[in-house]
Image (cartoon, grey):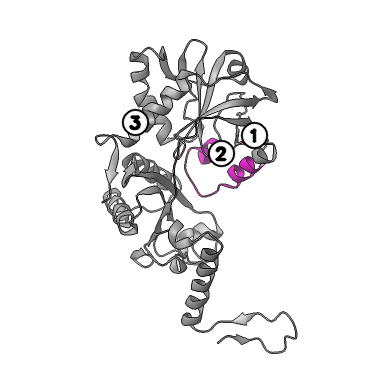
């Protein structure tokens, strides 16, 4: 039973003094979500928490301490990996970026060496029983207090979650617009930190304008990236071009595409593969194809890009479809960069 603060006549807030009641309330909330068609147990079949040093299967207990500096100061980094047919795709590449982000954010990675993180994530995924979806994981400065400095945090914290979802490659193409929300400075754009408010506002603005996502243009007039994706172009000369990664996030799927795309050169679909800066004007004049590239897409054609306020004439040509095919083939091949969890 809950108690109440004395002397309050209306809108009294219950006071829960027993962890049993709190757990009961959390489980009731999960059941309520399940009855509305969004069962947490199905969507999030497993979580790992270093605070508990174990894997959690009850969604009601998938919680993060409120005094974790990732929660109230944004002092944390994260990364992800696709899960397809029980395999984690490009996990090692994502972990390398994850640890680079943590180092830039000055989060101590000593308690969580790369092999330990890898083992935890594989075990978490195996325990979930999920074979299709993705995983997401975070490293924070840890819980400790509500101050700005993390010096009061005894140890960093690592969390991971398995997200079950159906995946189908979208082939019809989407619309993109130029972002109206300011782009992050390079220090923060090149690390995958939890401060995603610019990204959130950017994609909300795009949705308000009838687009799938927006594209940032930097202060030099170069096309940069989307809020959670890289951007790729195929020029009129059939050259695959991605913007350089010095001022944007180095997408693991984008880098994998760059590694696989020479196959398309050998097949005569493309003439060359390159990373270089491309201006909005060049994209308008010289691009016949444009696509978003990222985990979960992995290559999504943009058929109506509006860059600089003007719609660009692009089309969904064999180049984009071939990029889709080469990435999807890499996802499903047994000898690719995937890691089995079952």
Q: Which residues are magenta?
A: 183-204
Q: Image quadrant of residue 287?
A: top right
In the image, 194 versus 209, the foreground residue is 209
**Residues at badges 2 and 3 in contact (C-beta under 8 Å)?**
no
**Which residue is nearer to you in this view: 73 or 332?**
332
Q: Secondary structure at mark 3?
A: helix
The magenta stretch spans residue 328: no
Q: Is residue 125 left or right of residue 71?
A: left
Quarter of image, res 3: bottom right
Q: Which residue is mark 1?
A: 179
Report the front residue among 146 and 29: 29
Residue drawn at point x = 47 percent, y = 30 percent: 246
CB under 8 Å between discs 1 and 2: yes
At mark 2, the secondary structure is loop
Q: Specify which label sits upstream in the sequence, 1 or 2.
A: 1
Q: Which of the labelled discs sits on residue 227, or is there none?
A: 2
Measuring 55% from the left and 68% from the top, which residue is drawn there? 32
Q: Is residue 222 visible?
A: yes
Q: CA distance from mark 2 to mark 3?
A: 26 Å
- Residue at (72, 89) in percent of width and height: 7
Q: Is residue 149 in sight in this rendering?
A: no
Residue 69 x, y percent position in the rendering: 50, 60
Q: Is residue 187 above or below residue 195?
A: above
Where does the image place residue 166, in percent across and percent down from the top left? 44, 46
Real-space CA distance between mark 1 and mark 2, rounded to the nearest whole angstrom: 9 Å
Residue receiving disc 3 = 329
> Which residue is at the far top?
237
């Amino acid at each position: 039973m809950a108690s109440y603060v004395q002397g309050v006549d209306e809108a009294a807030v219950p006071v829960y003094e027993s962890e049993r009641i709190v757990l009961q309330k959390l489980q009731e909330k999960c059941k309520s979500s399940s009855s509305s068609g969004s069962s947490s147990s199905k969507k999030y079949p497993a979580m790992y928490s270093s605070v508990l040093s174990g894997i959690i299967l009850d969604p009601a207990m998938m919680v993060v301490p409120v005094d974790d500096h990732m929660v109230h100061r944004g002092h944390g980094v994260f990364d992800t990996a696709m899960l397809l047919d029980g395999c984690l795709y490009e996990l090692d590449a994502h972990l390398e970026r994850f640890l680079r982000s943590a180092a830039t954010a000055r989060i101590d990675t000593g308690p969580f060496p790369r092999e330990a993180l890898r083992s935890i994530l594989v075990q978490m995924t195996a325990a979930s029983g999920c074979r299709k979806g993705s995983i997401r994981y975070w490293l924070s400065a840890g819980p400790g207090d509500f101050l700005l400095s993390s010096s009061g945090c005894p140890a960093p914290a690592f969390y991971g979650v398995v997200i079950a979802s159906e995946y189908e490659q979208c082939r019809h193409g989407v619309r993109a617009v130029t972002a109206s929300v300011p782009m992050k400075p390079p220090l923060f754009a090149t690390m995958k930190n939890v401060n995603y408010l610019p990204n959130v506002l950017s994609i909300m603005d795009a949705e308000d304008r009838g687009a799938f996502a927006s594209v940032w243009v930097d202060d030099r007039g170069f096309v940069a990236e989307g809020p959670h994706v890289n951007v790729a172009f195929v020029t009129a000369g059939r050259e695959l071009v991605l913007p350089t990664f010095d001022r944007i996030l180095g997408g693991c799927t984008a880098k994998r595409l760059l590694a696989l795309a020479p196959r398309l050169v050998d097949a005569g679909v493309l003439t060359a593969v390159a990373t270089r800066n491309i201006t909005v004007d060049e994209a308008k004049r010289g691009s016949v194809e444009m696509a978003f590239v990222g985990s979960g897409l992995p290559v999504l054609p943009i058929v109506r890009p509006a860059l600089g306020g003007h719609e660009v004439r692009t089309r969904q040509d064999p180049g984009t479809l071939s990029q889709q095919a080469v990435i999807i083939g890499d996802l499903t091949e047994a000898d690719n960069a995937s890691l089995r969890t079952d």
